[in-house]
Amino acid sequence: QVQLAESGGGLVQAGGSLRLSCAASGNILTIHTMGWYRQAPGKQRELVATITSYVSTNYADAVKARFTISRDNANHTVYLQMNTLKPEDTAVYYCNAGLVDTWYDEYDLWGQGTQVTVSS
């Protein structure tokens, strides 16, 4: 069984920074794309950033030039460095991984979410 464990959320003032981490563990054969999504109260979950196994990245327009996604393939971990945070970045942030396990089953997995709150 594969699990994702997120960490790094919290409360920060506008203009501040946070770094989120998401580590995958379990019977992993390979992980393709990893990413971060967020869901604010009353809104749908939206893409923040993704990164492929070849380190190709994609960002939502709202976070470009402020957020940086990276990954450590050896440790099955993805990071999200968030700088110049704004109150509108407040949301629950979810990690996502597209993976193949040792049973050769391929699926998308979601983390439990971590709260990021940016005060003005």
Image: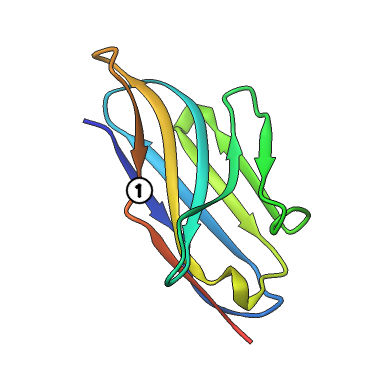
For the point 61% across and 78% down, the residue is 87
- Up the image or down, 78 lies above or below 106; here it is below
Location of the N terminus by quadrant is: top left
User: Mark 1: which secondary structure?
Assistant: loop
- Give percent across and percent down for residue 45: 46, 55
Name of the residue lying farthest toward the right? 65
Disc 1 crowd, CA 10 A, few/some/many (<14, 14-19, 20+) = some
Q: Nearer the viewer, residue 108 or 103?
A: 108
- Up the image or down, 54 lies above or below 78; here it is above
- Give percent across and percent down for residue 52: 59, 28
- Up the image or down, 65 lies above or below 98; here it is below
For the point 52% across and 41% down, the residue is 35
Location of the C terminus by quadrant is: bottom right
- Give percent across and percent down for residue 9: 47, 66
Tell me: 58 left or right of 94.
right
Tell me: 95 left or right of 28.
right
Question: Which residue does the numbered mark 1 point to in the structure image?
Answer: 111
State the image quarter where residue 14 is shown: bottom right
Q: Amino acid at mark 1?
A: Gly
